[in-house]
Image (tube, rainbow, N blue to C red):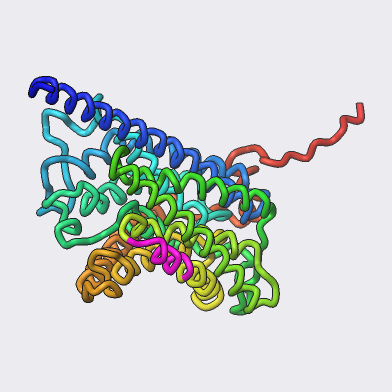
Amino acid sequence: MTEIQQEALNKAVETINGDMAALWITIAAVLVFFMQAGFTLVEIGFTRSKNAGNIIMKNIMDLCIGSIMFWAVGYGIMYGSDLVMGGFFRSSPADQGYFFFSATDWYNLFFQTVFCATAATIVSGAVAGRTKFSTYLILSAVITTLIYPISGSWYWPFDDDAWLNTAGFVDFAGSSVVHAVGGGAALVAAIMVGPRIGKYVDGKAIAIPGHNIPFGAIGVMILWLGWFGFNGGSQLAWGGDDTIGAGSVIINTNLAAAIGAVSALLLTWLKYGKPDVSMTLNGALAGLVGITAGCGAVSAWGALAIGLICGMLVVFSIEFIDKKLHIDDPVGAISVHGVCGFAGTVLVGLFALDGGLLYGGGAHLLWVQTYGSLAYIAWAAFGTFVVMFILKKTIGLRVSKETEMDGLDIHEHGSEAYPDFRLNSH
């Protein structure tokens, strides 16, 4: 083969690999897009039927608002080439503006957009059943336009200008960048909105059961499926070693989810005398969130360890936040995404094959993982507090007592998700 022929062959192979990577990222983005349906079903199933329509509206608006605002502004803040305020966030060059028109990179925009929408949606479950729809829409817009893109710029551009990337931080698919950010925002939002009426009586937490656990279970399975795109797509390439890498990520993701569910099941069986359904479902989600940071950095055994720890941790966390702190979180979003997002990120410092404490890497990575994840949570909490404080002083955060008791569907949207169909006597 001549040198010219070899160059032509190499170029063809490079083109095919690039197209395969773009196709894989697009397929993965579609899977992550479908996760929005999973979040919707989990939140509906774990809460009261009278608010199901409101939950549908919140989740679909997270996707709609996030798609528009991340395209218009967020992507430029997160991936722009110019640093602002010493690298606190980024900016697109003046000749490009913020509105995204790069045809060669549209698939990456789509992939990053659905991640952004996921961060916003995490908040929805924590404030379900008592929050004004208008207030929620504004918070969702700020998260997808500013809060998430700013903190995302600290790491995911993967260059020397991203301060956490330079520090050696590891968050393969977003235990902190996405989930801890959403969890931090959810924590502050739930505190500021306050608990649902009747949730705490004489200092005691009163259970308000979800109305449709089968919906919640289907939602968890959809999320589990979508997570293969969430984590596997974050390999950002396909072919050769990248195919092996993506496959390893997917296996680690599945193992962590499986052991997370099993560990939550066994723990609740021991604690309550019977295996708890909702805790088991949240255990699977906890494993998924926990492994998201290290799915590309740990072995299968490390994935099992992380999933096991997060599956048990979520049970203790949900109980502590509810019964001790008296923070009303109807679906356990703070624990699943915030607590396990932080834990999963930190555990990379123990189990990472390259630099982990248990693999002879010392404590450096463990320290970086800890302060990096805390930075994400602190930023999300601060940003959310500022927004919620302004909204509280202006349009208010909560619906009226009458609206909450009757259900948000009727008063906020003028319809019911489960109308009472009666035969017309005429």
Is 52 above or below relative to 344?
above
* Main SS category, magenta section: helix
Q: In front: 237, or 2?
A: 2
Q: Nearer the viewer, residue 398 or 158?
A: 158
- Answer with left or right where residue 33 lies relative to residue 268: left
Q: How many marks?
A: 0
Q: Residue at x 24, y 64 (%)?
A: 354
Residue 49, percent from left and from top:
67, 50
Q: Does residue 119 appear anywhere in the picture?
A: no
The question of residue 367 being in magenta is answered with no
Q: Nearer the viewer, residue 263 or 37?
A: 263
Residue at image point 15% right, 22% down: 8
Q: Dividing the image into 4 quarters, which one contains the C terminus?
A: top right
Query: Bounds of the magenta span?
Result: 298-308
Residue at 56 percent of width and 51 percent of height: 220
Left or right of residue 114, residue 215 in this image: right
Name the residue at the left extreme. 3
Report the quarter where the N terminus lies: top left
Residue visible at 46% across and 71% down in the picture: 309
Q: Position of residue 212 (x, y in %)?
A: 68, 52
Compared with residue 94, is residue 265 higher up or lower down, i.e. above or below? below
Image x and y of residue 379, in percent: 28, 60
Q: Residue furthest right?
A: 425
